[in-house]
Image (cartoon, helix red, strand yellow):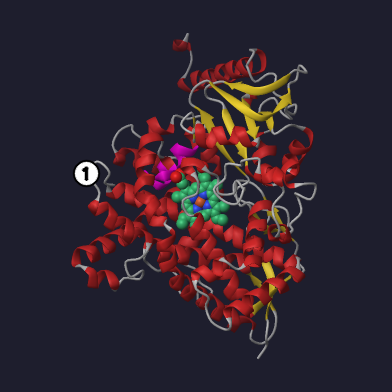
């Protein structure tokens, strides 16, 4: 039959048959998930995928929380069934107890391997465990303490530049840009032991623009990666041949992504070579480097030199970790900090109370790490912001075999029977509702959706403490939990508190007349207007004008 068809006709026919088979498989053939309640899909082809993962999906999520139990079945592309889960016991099984049965999705792993190279973001099972074994100590709180002086120094630069800008009166400033530049520089000095940005003019390092463009530019390829065997394709032929093929695909967007990846890799190759040379030259050369040998990469390189041959990381892996750290650290923390500044501008009374606490603690100078992390209202503002506005609203996993998912409390199935557990077939995508858990009214109370820092100044409701939510941070899922919990969460806590304490001592932040809205998408980002570019203008004024 294929003798009568051209290659393109055969490809189209194969695609149609494949789509037809999926429609039959997911809409007609029975599944153990049929009894799990969930919304009727809004499209036979796309299911509710765009409603769930789109930029303006908050209303859809809230509708799910209102209408369904904390395990919901959602139809996605061509009817594929996905579970959306925020039942605490179920989440514990997914990310802790049975974490190797619910691994990252192949799309996530393949995409990260192609973009960043081998790293925590693209490894599984034993390989991932080995990498965490080497990396966990590097993120230990003792190293963070050493970094606080570096963090203060960088934040002072930001303060000086902003002070210059508003010295003759309040001004509207695009704060997301400054916060993102600061986050990259904090990671550059604290994480990589290098410097990219002096933060003293209006010209950010080109990496800021590239890292910000990476997610939007690569979104279509991320979707494509769901359906193409990217990992196998990435091993066909030599690297040179693969590169030739990519360079000849007529897609400007693809070439933009490739240029970003090249840029990231070239910058990191230079940093790695300089670090290795300094380590080989001895302690004096290390001390002359930007991070004085205390940054994450220097500590990691030293640990790597001592590691057994079996545990040692290759240069390719080290470069992969550098690129993925830059990516994982920058967008998340800058989004979080921008959100806190926006919330403080929306709630001037909270901003004033926080400023008083900071001014009293700082007494005009920097506060040491332990004193800073112990400030109760600062802690309450950070926790509450990370609860209601977690930068990542959800994270997906995929079952690697048939598995039974137990629940904290039974849910009513579509046939009216109560279910204590759900049989989940192999290859099911299970999405953890991070925001859904953080805003769960059954646990946090009827005001769960409201931003109220004061709730952290008194004991949390027993419904929260007894739910055994498996997150690493304050009964929240913001940084996830288990073996793949955010490795940089202490780093980001310190970053947020240092930046907030230095800025709030000097500046007051007010809403501008441009309305800022937050897009949910992959990571929450602010924009002016519904689909505008990522930005967050705020009016900045000196607390004590000279
Ligand atoms: C507010 C800031 C941050 C938030 C909300 C956040 C959130 C998360 C979440 C939810 C994960 C789990 C991802 C998954 O399972 O697929 C994660 C993983 C990760 N994060 Fe963060 N993160 C933040 C800041 C940082 C920083 C500052 C760094 C680095 C210095 C970092 C490095 C990483 C890395 C390397 C992973 C992968 C861990 C692994 O797979 O073992 N993150 N983060």
Q: Can residue 101 be seen at all in this image of the molecule?
A: yes
Q: Tell me if residue 221 comes above or below residue 12 in the rendering.
A: below
Horizontal side, residue 11 vs residue 65: left or right: left
The image position of residue 112, as x and y in percent, is 44, 43
Along the line of sight, the residue nearer the viewer: 371 or 271: 371
Q: Tell me if residue 200 comes above or below residue 441 in the rendering.
A: below
Residue occupying image coordinates x 43% and y 48%: 258
- Residue sitting at the far bottom: 546
Whether the magenta-drawn stretch holds residue 216 is answered as: no
The stretch of residues the image draws in magenta is 108-121
Residue occupying image coordinates x 43% and y 72%: 150
Q: Can residue 212 be seen at all in this image of the molecule?
A: no
Q: Main secondary structure of the magenta part?
A: helix
Q: Tell me if residue 463 comes above or below residue 533 in the rendering.
A: above
Disc 1 is placed on an element classified as loop
Residue occupying image coordinates x 60% and y 70%: 500
Q: Tell me if residue 138 comes above or below residue 175 in the rendering.
A: above
> Mark 1 — residue?
309
Residues packed near mark 1 inside 10 Å, few (<14), some (14 to 19) or many (20 plus): few
- Which of the 4 quarters of the picture holds residue 493? bottom right
- Which of the 4 quarters of the picture holds residue 131? top left
Residue occupying image coordinates x 50% and y 69%: 369
Horizontal side, residue 29 vs residue 1: left or right: right
Along the line of sight, the residue nearer the viewer: 212 or 7: 212
The image position of residue 301, as x and y in percent, is 29, 56
């Amino acid at each position: 039959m294929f003798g009568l068809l051209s290659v393109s006709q055969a490809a189209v026919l194969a695609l149609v048959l494949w789509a037809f088979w999926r429609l039959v498989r997911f809409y007609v053939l029975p599944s153990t998930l049929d009894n799990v309640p969930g919304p009727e899909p809004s499209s036979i082809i796309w299911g509710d995928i765009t409603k769930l993962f789109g930029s303006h999906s908050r209303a859809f999520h809230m509708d799910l929380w209102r209408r369904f139990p904390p395990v919901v079945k959602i139809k996605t592309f061509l009817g594929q069934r996905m579970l959306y889960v925020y039942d605490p016991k179920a989440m514990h099984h997914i990310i802790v107890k049975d974490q190797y049965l619910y691994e990252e999705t192949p799309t996530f792993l393949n995409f990260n391997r192609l973009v960043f190279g081998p790293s925590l973001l693209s490894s599984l099972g034993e390989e991932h465990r080995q990498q965490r074994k080497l990396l966990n100590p590097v993120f230990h709180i003792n190293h963070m303490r050493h970094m606080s002086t570096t963090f203060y120094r960088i934040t002072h630069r930001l303060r000086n530049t902003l002070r210059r800008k508003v010295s003759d009166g309040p001004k509207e400033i695009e704060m997301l840009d400054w916060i993102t530049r600061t986050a990259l520089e904090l990671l550059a000095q604290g994480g990589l032991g290098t410097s990219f940005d002096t933060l003293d003019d209006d010209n950010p390092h080109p990496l800021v623009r590239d890292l910000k463009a990476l997610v939007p530019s690569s979104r279509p390829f991320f979707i494509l990666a769901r359906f193409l065997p990217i990992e196998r394709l990435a091993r066909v032929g030599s690297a040179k041949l693969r590169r030739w093929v990519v360079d000849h695909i007529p897609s400007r967007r693809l070439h933009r992504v490739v240029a970003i990846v090249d840029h990231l890799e070239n910058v990191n190759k230079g940093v790695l070579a300089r670090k290795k040379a300094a380590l080989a030259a001895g302690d004096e050369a290390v001390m002359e480097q930007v991070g004085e040998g205390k940054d994450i990469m220097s500590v990691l390189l030293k640990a790597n030199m001592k590691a057994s041959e079996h545990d040692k990381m290759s240069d390719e892996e080290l470069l992969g970790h550098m690129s993925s750290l830059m990516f994982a650290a920058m967008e998340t923390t800058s989004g979080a900090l921008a959100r806190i500044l926006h919330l403080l501008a929306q709630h001037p009374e909270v901003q004033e109370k926080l400023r008083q606490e900071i001014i009293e603690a700082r007494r005009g100078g920097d506060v040491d790490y332990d004193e800073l992390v112990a400030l109760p209202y600062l802690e309450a503002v950070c926790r509450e912001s990370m609860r209601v506005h977690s930068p990542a609203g959800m994270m997906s996993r995929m079952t690697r075999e048939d598995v039974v998912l137990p629940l904290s409390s039974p849910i009513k199935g579509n046939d009216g029977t109560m279910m204590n557990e759900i049989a989940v077939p192999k290859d099911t995508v299970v999405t953890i509702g991070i925001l859904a858990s953080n805003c769960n009214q059954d646990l946090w109370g009827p005001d769960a959706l409201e931003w109220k820092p004061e709730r952290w100044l008194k004991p949390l409701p027993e419904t929260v403490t007894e739910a055994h939510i498996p997150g690493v941070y304050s009964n929240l899922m913001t940084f996830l939990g288990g073996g793949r919990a955010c490795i940089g969460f202490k780093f980001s806590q310190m970053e947020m508190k240092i930046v907030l304490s230095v800025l709030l001592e000097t500046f007051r932040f007010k809403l501008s007349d441009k309305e800022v809205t937050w897009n949910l998408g992959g990571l929450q980002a602010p924009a002016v207007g519904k689909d505008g570019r990522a930005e967050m203008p705020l009016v900045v004024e000196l607390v004590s004008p000279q």
